[in-house]
Structure formats: C-alpha cells, structure tokens
Amino acid sequence: MTELGIPALRSGTESVPTTDQPQTGKDFTSDQEVRWCPGCGDYAVLKAVQSFLPDLGLRRENIVFVSGIGCSSRFPYYLDTYGMHSIHGRAPSIATGIATAREDLSVWVVTGDGDALSIGGNHLIHALRRNVNMTILLFNNRIYGLTKGQYSPTSETGKVTKSTPMGSLDHPFNPVSLALGAEASFVARTIDSDRKHLTSVLAAAAAHRGTSLVEIYQNCPIFNDGAFDAIKNPDTKADAIIPLVHGEQVRFGALGEDGRGTRALVRDRSTGNIRTVAVADVDDADILVHDAHQDDPSTAFAISRLTDSGYLNQSPIGIFRQVERRTYDDAAREQVAAALGGSGNDDTAGRAARLAALIGGGDTWTIL
C-alpha cells in the first residue's frame, strides 16, 4: 500500500526492457532535417524530449511515438525510436491498440490542439477515461498552424483569423478541464520555454502508469505569435503563473518578505469555488494546499477553471491530478489470459489452441 492508502501499482515503464548502455540526447536524434518555422516552440519541446528520454534508461526499440496530423505531428520523424505519423485525430486510438498488444513498449502520443480537440476529441476523451498506459503530449498554440492560421478549438472568442475574419464565435475548450472531466488519472500543464519545468513534468508523466495528459503551451510565431506573452514575460509572469506543487500552499505573484508569493488561492466558503486573494487578507490556514493525489477531481477541476479563456492574465501551471487507477490495457490482458484458461505466461502453442477453441466454440458453422 502507498502512503495514500492506494494499492501499489506498477510504474509506467516497469514492464519495458531497459538498457545498461549509456545514452545521450544524440542517441534519440534521427538523421532527418527538422522542418518547423523559425522560432516555433516545437523546437524547444523536441530538444527537451530528446534530452529527457535517456533518463528513462529504456531501449530505443521499445519506445514508440504516435502522432496525428499537424505541425507537432512531425515529431516521430525527428526521434530515433519507433514511430508512426498516423491519421488526423486518431493517434490515441492507434496508441491504445499498441499499448494493449505490447506491454513491453513505452507508448507516447504527440498531438496538437486542433488534432486532439477537434476531429480527435472523441478519441482523446475515451483514451483518458479508459486509462490506457500512454503519455499524451498536447501542444497548444491556440491556432491551426499547418493549414495556415485558422482558429482552433482553443482559440479565444473573438479571435480574428483567416477563417474568422470578423472574430471567432466559438467558446474555447480548456484542455485541462476537459481531461479532468474525463477523470484522467494524470493531468498536467507546462510551458515550451521552461525547460526545467517541462522536463520535470515529462518525468512524472512517464513514471505514471495510466494515461498521462500533458498540455504544453507552445508559441506559433507565424500565425499566433505572443499568445502566451503574459506567462513568459519576466515583468508579468509572476502574476500570470499560478504554480501547482503537491503538498505546498498555492501562492503566486510578487515575492513578499518571506520569499513567497503575495497572492494565493483559497476556497470560497459561500460557493465552494476557488478564488485568488492577497495573502495579507486571509489567514495562513485558509490558503489552499495543493493535493494532486486527491481521488475526487473536483478541486483540481476548480483550479483549472482559473485559466483565463484568453490566457492573458493567469494560468495554473503544474500537475493538477496524479492518482493511481487500474489501467485498461492491464485489465484487457488479464481478461484475455483468463478467457484462455492460462496465466498469460504459458507456452504459445497451448495459448493458440485455447484461442482456437474459444473462437470456434458456441454457435459456429462451417460453410463448405
């Protein structure tokens, strides 16, 4: 049992073969020319992933990246691992099949806000609720970049683009709220330009057994430049970023005499909602202590709603939820083994015979 009283489950990569050979970022860098627009945030994320993968200690042939369609979906070409540039919005479904059939693989999905939340929205939410053992990196630049600048499901209302010359009428998705609503077992948000934070979130996501959803704020310098200036500008980011650290008070803003933020999150006693206050105006005991391991996602969801719909003023950054729950692929393999009458580790011939008997049993006919 863990300290939370949750039955201990295997880590996300426990079943994946490891290597005793030293690895570096170069080992995970392919020979393909990286082709994104100058200044694209994808470069920073790619470099962070290439530098982080050696820390997993896994064999490269047991790592697979699956992408959909979009600028970020070129990712598999640039990594010296197995990979698949798949179908628009369907990467989570393909990854589900891979993870279920091959427990010995570390499965990653790379997708964008258009790919994942528009045509792929249904596939994403079902992967999250099933809790398949995979890590999903959702690059959010709030625009369709590959198809040259149409508004996306995360573009703010009123966004003027080539497809909305008078401003978008749509209300945008909040990807973190969406994931928490689907009861994803691991949900986090990070920033392309914050290498240290990005790497720490990637490490936690990879270690998690189940579906990990990591939203990455990523700048598109061509079609949506400056979308996240508030959280990147040294003059504004202290007030714009609400850092979430498990077990610590949620404080942000300019530093006070105690070296901590002078603003904080509290729960409104009358409504139960989460709101921001000045630390000086509340008792220290009333300041919210972040609990990413809380089984009920309600508080995490309430925190996610603090995200400004235009991301102009403030945005919680960090791990919102990190809980342990049975994974779909583990359960599916156990069910197959039970149906075949074996442990899953017996001889191949015996399993094949039982499978044939299972398929051929019951109401079947032979047509001559």
Image (cartoon, rainbow, N blue to C red):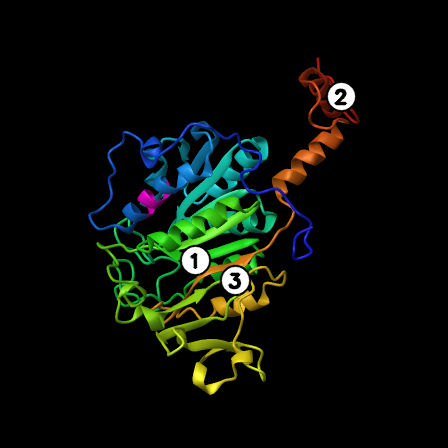
Is residue 241 part of the magenta span, yes or no?
Answer: no
Q: Position of residue 164 (x, y in %)?
A: 29, 62
Give amino acid for label 1. Arg
The answer to whether the residues at label 1 and label 3 have Cβ atoms under 8 Å apart is no
Tell me: 334 left or right of 272.
right
Q: Is residue 117 visible?
A: no
Which mark, by number, is residue 189? Answer: 1
**In this orientation, which residue lies closer to the viewer: 367 or 196?**
196
Residue behind mark 2: 357
Label 2 amino acid?
Ala
| Of pointers 3 and 2, the one earlier in the residue sequence | 3
Q: Quadrant of the C terminus?
A: top right
- Residue nearest the observer in this picture, 242 or 210: 242
Magenta residues, dominant SS class: helix
User: Is residue 51 at all visible to an observer of this figure?
Assistant: yes
Q: Amino acid at mark 3?
A: His
Q: Are marks 1 and 2 in contact (CB under 8 Å)?
A: no
Instruction: Tell me the CA gap for discs 3 and 2.
Output: 51 Å
Residue 316 position within the rendered picture, expressed as x and y whole percent measured from the top left? 43, 66
